Image (cartoon, helix red, strand yellow):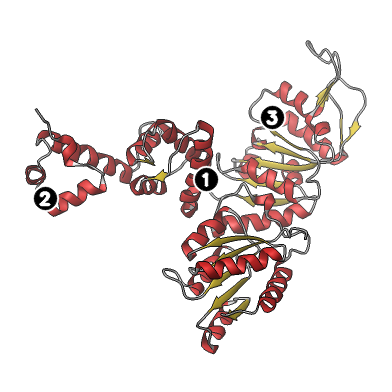
Amino acid sequence: MNKSPHKILVVDDDADIVRLIAMRLQAAGYRVETAASAEQALALDAAGKFQLVITDLRMDGMDGLAFFDTLHRSDPGLPVIILTAHGSIPDAVEATRRGVFGFLTKPFDSKELLKQVSAALRLAQPANGDGSDDWRSEFISRSPAVETMLQQARLAAASDASVLIRGESGTGKEVLANAIHRASPRHDRPFVAINCGAMPEPLLESELFGHAKGAFTGAARDHKGLFQAANGGTLLLDEIGDMPLALQIKLLRVLQEHSVRPVGATTSVPVDVRILAATHRDLAEEMKTGRFREDLYYRINVVGVEIPPLADRREDIPLLAGHFLAAICRKYDKSINGFAPEALELLIAAPWPGNVRQLQNVVEQTVVLCTMSLIPASLVQKALRDDVGGILPFELARHNFERDYLSRLLQATNGNVAQAARLAQRNRTEFYKLLERHQLSPSLFKQHD
């Protein structure tokens, strides 16, 4: 039997039920992942999108309806079938009122289950796609703002319109551009990217449009530019707001005429290229000051998509940190299980002016320096301090001060907690809680003969 492209998540704290449902679905050709709790299921859904969720209603921790509500805040179109041994008319009415697709009671009938699965997947099937979310696999997110942005990107991808991607440095503009290309009808053709602000004007012109042999000193042969390299596919003009005005005029001509003339050539070459542009600048402001051409702006900004900064999607920080941790551990062949709770709190609270790229750098530094199974808060503090030039946000600075202060107290008192608590003018119970929060063991400060 051919494997279905649809991926289904089955959630139940009864291992036997999960195994039985998974067997039925796999026998029907579906791809299946399982979770023993709603909390585990949310982590799986954030890491890899599903086309359908089947969940038990009564579970320890978050129940099925609360799980459904959480899922639908980030993905309103995701169909959910609820399964329960406690089926009743009020439960079914409430589930249906909230938008649950289907409601089955245990013991379930396999034919009825497969019938509902098939109907749910037909309902969720995009009009212009195969239902696969592989195009967006590089976006690790559970943020509603990112979900909305990706839905806009998917709609834009179906057309051939130019797209302007706006976002702060480090938010992943090139990643989104690549995702749009993969979701587009041009997905089997080249995707080519160039940073318009990373090279001088003569070199950028040659890279974009190509040059003829002898066009300038050192041009020993004809060179096809990136427009020709991307022919039939997609060209990303990253940081287009940094493009010199003279080149903006030449770029506009290429976009109007659908042909490119290499530097030093006497004839033009036709090109068929879909243009994506990206910038961290406010191009409307750049137009007012005369640094960006208005006619080019309207040519590249047929559809606008904006990536939210990491500080506006803090719910994604644990997911992204875990994703980077796994990848970087493979890179350095290290075995680290995760972040200590205090370390994760520091990551979530940090300001992230450098966005996702900065988070990746911080995680890499902590992995390189870590010698334990969990990354401690101290390594995260060091990486953040190194990354922002020595200026810490208030909460991080206070956390850092507390740890240093407690360490000095324990050193001064030879690890005597009662004496240290008196010096700090805190009761012993509160002092122990402070030590526990900062993972400080008094025994480590005791000096032995």
Q: Earlier in the sequence, mark 3 or mark 1?
A: 3
Between 216 and 67, the one nearer to me in the picture:
67
Tag 2 and tag 1, C-beta contact below 8 Å: no
Inter-mark Cα distance, 3 to 1: 38 Å
Q: Nearer the viewer, residue 128 or 121?
A: 121
Assess disc 2: are there few (<14), some (14-19) or many (≥20) residues with their C-alpha within 10 Å of its C-alpha.
few
Which amino acid, by three-letter code, is at mark 2? Arg
Instruction: Tell me the quarter of the image containing the N terminus.
Output: bottom right
Q: Which residue is mark 2?
A: 426
Residue 290 in view in this figure: no
Residue 175: x and y in percent read: 64, 43
Mark nearer the viewer, 3 or 1:
1
Of label 2 and label 3, which has the lower sequence position? 3
- Give x and y (percent) for residue 49: 62, 57
Against 198, is 53 above or below? below
Quick one: 160 or 255, which is closer to the camera? Answer: 160
**Residue on which the image places disc 1:** 323
Of marks 2 and 1, the one in the foreground: 1
As drawn, is 392 to the left or to the right of 437?
A: right
State the image coordinates of residue 10 (x, y, percent, origin top left): 58, 66
Q: CA distance from mark 2 to mark 3?
A: 63 Å
- Name the residue beneath numbered marker 3: 244
Please state which amino acid type lies under the numbered disc 3: Pro
Within 10 Å of the Cα at label 1, are there few (<14), some (14-19), or many (20+) other Cα atoms?
Answer: some
Question: In what element is the residue under mark 3?
Answer: loop
Using residue 333 as the reference point, say whether residue 286 is left or right of it: right
